[in-house]
Amino acid sequence: MSQTTTFLLVLLGTVAWFLLPLLPAIRELLWPTDIAPLRVADRDAANVALFAQGFRTYLHRQLEFLPTDTPEESVGVLPDRTPYVRGRRLPDSLLDEARLEGGLDRLVVLTGPATLAGGETFLRELYASRGFAGGPRGVYRAVLGDAGITLGPGTLVLRWVHARSDLLVGNGSLLSGRASADQAIRLGGEVGFDRLGARTIIVAGGASLPDLPAPVPEPFIVPETGSRVVGDHLRVEGDLHVPRNAVLTGNLVVTGKVAMGPGAHLVGSLKAHQEIELGDGARIDGAVVSRTTVTSAFRVAMGGPVVAEQEIRLGPGNTVGLQHRPTSLAARRIELGIGTTIHGLITASEGGVTTKLPE
Amino acid sequence: MIGAILVTVLAAIVAVILIYTIRHYTFTINRLVGQHRQPYVDIGVADWPEVVVLVPAHNEAKVIGGMLDALLEQDYPPDRLTIVPINDRSTDATAAIVDRYAAAHPGRIAPFHRTDGVGGKAAALRDAAANFGGQVHLVFDADYLPGQSLVKQLVAPFFDPEVGAVMGRVVPHNVSRSLLTRLLDLERAGGYQVDQQARMNLRLVPQYGGTVGGVRRAAVEAVGGWSADTLAEDTDMTYRLVLAGWEIVYQNRSECYEEVPENWPTRIRQIMRWTQGHNQSLWRYWWPLLKRPGHLRPGLVLDGLLLLGVFAVGPLLLVGWGVAIALFFMGVIPLHGFVALLGITAYGTLGNFAAFFEVATAARLDGTLGRIRILPFLAFGFLVSLVSVSRATLAQIFLPRPRQPRQWDKTERYRGDNGAAPKVHQ
Amino acid sequence: MVGMAIPRTTILIATVLGLGGAVAVVAALNPLAELWARAFEALAGPLGIPGGVAMQGTSVLGLHTLQTPFYLLQAAPPSALMLRNVAIVAGLLLLATIVVPQRFVPLRYFLRFLILLQGISLGYFALAPAGGFPYTLPSYVAGLVGMGQVVLVLLPVILAITYYLFDISWARKLLLSILLLGHLAVMIPLQATVHAWLIARGSLLFLPPLFLVFGILVHVLVFVAFYGWGMSWPSARRRA
């Protein structure tokens, strides 16, 4: 073999060796396995009840296709082979199963008002067409109620719960995932949550809170030094302290901390690069946004949305939004004081909690 | 002497390239493990402000209907949403289609027909925006396909009074058409899923991209309105807003489909256009940025400068190669022995790999694993971009721009006349 | 938002494997260099590469001496005839790139870049004084192999930062690393042999384009190919 021929073989071998790691790339190019556009899911930020709606549709379809001779009180499997039980109340045998370790592995359809003693575990969804009252320490994968739902103290909801009218949640419960109601959600003390959505969300204990005297408003002008107008807002470099009962009009962006004294009122929106602290009776008509935390004292009112990149701590008797102008409250961690009322949507991406009720 | 000068020049260029390399790695690592900022994405319920959606359109008969349909289906309060297709002297059926939609949806669609004035998207936006109120102006290209909740998602950040502009994520939908579309899909993923989000996380300068995004009308007015004399009104607006003290927000989860170029000539034209527009902004704003208005952090200024220079890196790289080749022929090696070997090799491997790392990470975060295998073919895209960017920059420097009315520079449309495109999944 | 929570154990293992891998490669380089030298000797005969094979020792910060094998054969600068012929071929190739279809624009650009480099080389050898070219074939081969050795050392560290952090099984990560290092361990001497033969037969005229285009960029492309393949593997959690 000539030297040139030998070289050509070596060259061929080198090129082949070089191409070897490119084979997966060439294969994917010629016979693609992943070539579809990225799935762009339309975000459902506003619709906390999305899963509940999906379940309702699913359930009606399944029930619709049950054999026509299926009695109202029945235990069996749905057309998609999901085990279920339907009736005005749960049979004792199944209640016992729900109370044992492991829980009841059936989709439950309750056609009458139902009250449970407590301690049950439901591994699949529970649907109640009339009122539903769960006892203490119940564990639910998901609950859909076409009337009101009451969850006893220490309840655990794993995925979602939705009530067509009101949702009442007992002390010490944990609502993982989504909790929503068409009317109101009433929360006890030390209730954990992720996302809540309703016309009105109320933490218990508000009735015992005193009112504040009406503030005597005093006009306040932000000092010119360190502040300037930027478009439609006033930018303040550094910290800002708004005195008691001061009234400001306009949008504010503060690069430091903001402390609003008791009774202070901002007719506009507020953004701070650091902490926002709102004193007793303070009011902000518009949005409240902080890169860190928002902390409010007693009977503070905010129009919303209220957004903090770290934490929101609402004191007793706070109000966020209005019934005819619902809004959103969002932060990594949220703490709701007693008697707090929020109209709209609450999202705590790392978890929220209501404070302990007084004895 | 000449060798010393060339070595100095090469060292300076290598330093700049290294900064960009470090930037790539920093952004990718941040995107993987940093704390992710998306503070406004959970604003789902609010007293929504009045919004005007501007859709600049020049000969967009193939696609404008699809866009208007998508906007009409938005879950935004209809009494607070005005859709303004801007027909800029189209010679096809765009005007007729737009008027037909306006007649069918009175009060919701308000066409704006331009028959004279400076041509181009920037001028069209400027003229139309001046005629409409609203607190927020969103801008979509005519071929985009917004999902039902996209308007709300893009408007949500404007509740923060400091926000001047918002940018969503652009996702190619014609991925399967050619190797180029598949490569562009990967590049887009890297640019948005990693680059833009990292800049958002680190409070740097996410770029407002001129589509799938919006601006606060008061902010635009405060900085003098849209510039008609720029090829990249989006980059121009980004920097004017940042210099004036506004914040730019990027929302990774606010996604919208687009069509990417399906052939190389179209891609080359696109990137040359972007280059020249971006370089215009580089020329205008590097000094104002460097002078650092008091409200800008040093890190933000640095990132802003790096972002301005991103299309200048290509020509700089070519100059660097030229200098390196000259030094090679002169037999001048800047370092010695093993250090030279290590330095050159490390620079060659790490420097060239940074962009691949970013893209692969983005695709993995997207869960689109199979397509990562074609990563080596990205080298084709980089080569074409490098040449196109350099050509555009050289033309910009050495060839005067002809004095003629500014034209529409836009990408070809590939959808059929019915404007059909993939549905957004619920 | 999707991100990655990287467990501390992953960071620890990645660090250990990255640094440990680099140290292991350093320890293996000299034995590998011996293997490469024997491969060179085995190939030299059939390929007609005279002069034999030698080892170059490079001091690594005074702590270690890195042995790098290279061919001793020399290459001459191009003759006038060679310059003319290559210039004609380059010119024809340049013309040919005009008819490359639009679908292959990247190929067109690549060929033109290669032709440009070859053209610069032509211009240099046509105009530079005789004997002025600063590189000899032996020093070039030694440099090329040396770069390959450094790439091998850097790879575990690069993988630690860019690959080991992902939630892919450790077995797969190690497999990819071994395949990559093994591939390059074979690639480097083959590449050096091909370069040496072409330059020796063709003249030093071909050294610059070979080095600048088919040198370290080949290693990078191989790395990217392996990396893309490895990154396409599913996460360990999903597979479980």
Image (tube, coloured by chain):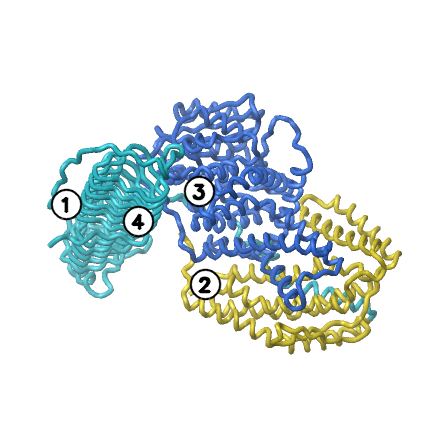
Chain C: what color? yellow
Residue B364 image position (x, y, % from top left): 48, 56
- Give the chain of mark 4: A
Q: Is residue B272 above or below residue B112?
A: below
Q: Are marks 4 and 2 in contact (CB under 8 Å)?
A: no
Q: Are marks 4 and 1 on the same chain?
A: yes
Inspect the image, locate mark 2, and give the three-letter code of the amino acid beneath it.
Answer: Asp
Dot 2 crowding, Cα within 10 Å, few <14, some 14–19, many 20+: many
Q: Are marks 4 and 1 in contact (CB under 8 Å)?
A: no
Q: Nearer the viewer, residue B61 or C129?
A: C129
* Image position of C19 (left or right of B393): left
Q: Label 1: which residue?
A: A206
SS state under label 3: loop
* Image position of C104 (left or right of B375): right
Distance Cα–Cα, label 1 vs label 3: 46 Å
Question: Which label sits in the foreground, 3 or 2?
Answer: 3
Quadrant of image for the C terminus of chain B:
top left
Q: Label 2: which residue?
A: C167
Q: Nearer the viewer, residue C90 or A310?
A: A310
Single out the residue that lies furthest toward the front.
Answer: A225
Q: Which chain is assigned cyan? A: A
Inspect the image, locate mark 4, and give the three-letter code of the amino acid beneath it.
Answer: Thr
Q: Label 4: which residue?
A: A293
Q: Label 3: which residue?
A: B294
Chain B: what color? blue
